[in-house]
Image: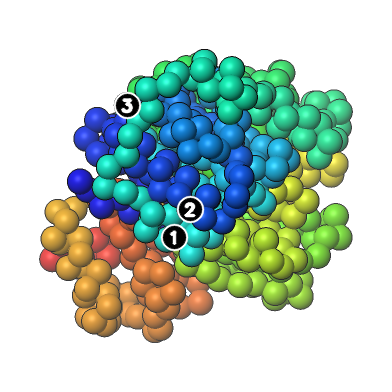
Amino acid sequence: MIKIKFGTDGWRAIIAQEYTTDNVARVAQGTANWLLEKNETAKVVIGYDCRFGGPLFAQVAARVFCNNGIKVIMSSSFVSTPMVSLAAAEWGAQQGIVITASHNPPSYNGFKLKAHYGGPSIPSVVAEVEDQIPETAEIPAKTMEAYEKEGMLEYRDMEELYFQKVKEGFDLDAIRNSGIQIGYDAMYGAGQSVLPRILPNASLLHCEYNPSFLGTAPEPLHRNLGELSALMASNDALKVGLANDGDADRIGMYDSSGNFIDSHHIILLLIHYLHKYKKMSGKVVIAFSVTDKVRKLCDLYGIECQVTKIGFKYICGIMVDEDVLLGGEESGGIAIKGFIPERDGIWMGLTLLEFMAKTGKSIEELIQEVYDIVGGFVFERNDLHLDNDLKWQIVENCKAGKYESFGKFKVERIEDIDGHKFHFSDTQWVMIRPSGTEPVLRVYAEAPTAEGVEEILTEVKKVLLS
């Protein structure tokens, strides 16, 4: 039997290879063992997104939990990860389980652990669950209908719970009456049902069930969102574009001309809105790969800024224990004060739509406000699909300090909180880090211009592959 390890955000594997019903049962049994050690009685919430086999794998997990005397609450259809996290917090569950591989390619599925407070389980808990995963686990023969009759299984509407929370949390009338027309790309993911309920007049893309995702990984990056970019550029009525990943906990955005707005800009916009406009307080917590402009903005606003390892579970642990205004990652996973400590792409999009509606300003004008404070910048990320030996050799070279320059770019200082960030100046840097869930080496770069970023990425790739 394979050793099952959780990565940056849950266990993920290729369907029918390592991601099988037998292995899902093993992970569910390990989670059940951990829960019963901590609680005499326990309750879990289980959801699944739009990936292939979601209902089947969710039902396997549910039957294992029920067989262990753990009450299960499920949705009868696909849901987003934030919906499961919210349900765990609102319905008094000790654990939430999401069957999802988030933004990974369509051949993957996964298993995320969500805690009672409505966010990712902290790393120490994840490690404890890992240690409890047995080599084999029985898939109970008893049916879902039998467990439902016994009262061990209950179906509830998690989307409706979330929808009502959105109505409480936002001035939807202001957004809907502002005249701001939006384009929305669900990427065939779990946002495809609820976003049209919230914003009925949105122009929709890929808001139908298609577990193949048409062969594209549902990650809200510009290279995956060509149709949304083209829609924004060709339709003068549309003022902002939103996109979410497969389980709708990440966000991508476009301006009215079809230019991509990355998560770094979104994080800066949110801090700017929450602190300057809404007068909210609290520290900012960001992952290591986020732009240094966030630290600059926080310094100017007198806000504490803390940098963590990559993985929202590290940010969430701080949000649970401290007063945090915003927690965010480069990958588009962002959470803000006033909701659960969980990434939520839809919630972040609505916050920025409310910002536009309340100020009467375009997203371009609001970005310029941020640039006036911290300066303009461009960020880009390359994913290098390499031979595994070469990938790890590059990582070892970084650890050994073998990269003192990349072409004309001389390294002035290095940070190694999680990966290696090579600073060339106050406004130019590159970061190298292996993916925690895919056979990929990620290379991140920032510079004042797009040409500068491209030059850095080109020079770095030459050196890494030489």
Mark 2: give few (<14), some (14-19) or many (20+) Cα within 10 Å. some
Where disc 3 sits, the SS reads helix
Mark found first going from the N terminus, 1 or 3: 1
Q: Are marks 2 and 1 in contact (CB under 8 Å)?
A: yes
Residue 77 can be seen in this image: no
Tell me: 410 left or right of 294: left
> What amino acid is found at the position of numbered circle 1 in the picture?
Glu
In the displayed structure, would residue 201 be above or below residue 337? above
**Which residue lies under the disc numbered 2?**
34
In the displayed structure, would residue 346 be above or below residue 429? above
Place of residue 76 in the rendered image (x, y in percent of width and height, measured from the top left) = 57, 19
Where disc 2 sits, the SS reads helix
Real-space CA distance between mark 1 and mark 3, rounded to the nearest whole angstrom: 35 Å
Q: Are marks 1 and 3 in contact (CB under 8 Å)?
A: no
Q: Residue 235 lies in what quarter of the image? A: top right
Place of residue 403 in the rendered image (x, y in percent of width and height, measured from the top left) = 25, 78
Place of residue 383 in the rendered image (x, y in percent of width and height, measured from the top left) = 31, 51
Q: What residue sits 37% from the left and 58% below the top?
A: 131
Mark 3: give few (<14), some (14-19) or many (20+) Cα within 10 Å. few
> What amino acid is found at the position of numbered circle 3 in the picture?
Gly
Mark found first going from the N terminus, 2 or 3: 2
In the displayed structure, would residue 115 be above or below residue 422? above
**Which residue lies under the disc numbered 1?**
128
In the depicted view, which residue is nearer to us: 238 or 334?
334
In the depicted view, which residue is nearer to us: 89 or 26?
26
**Between tags 2 and 3, which lies in front?**
2
Say which mark, if any, is on residue 215. 3
Where disc 1 sits, the SS reads helix
> What amino acid is found at the position of numbered circle 2 in the picture?
Trp
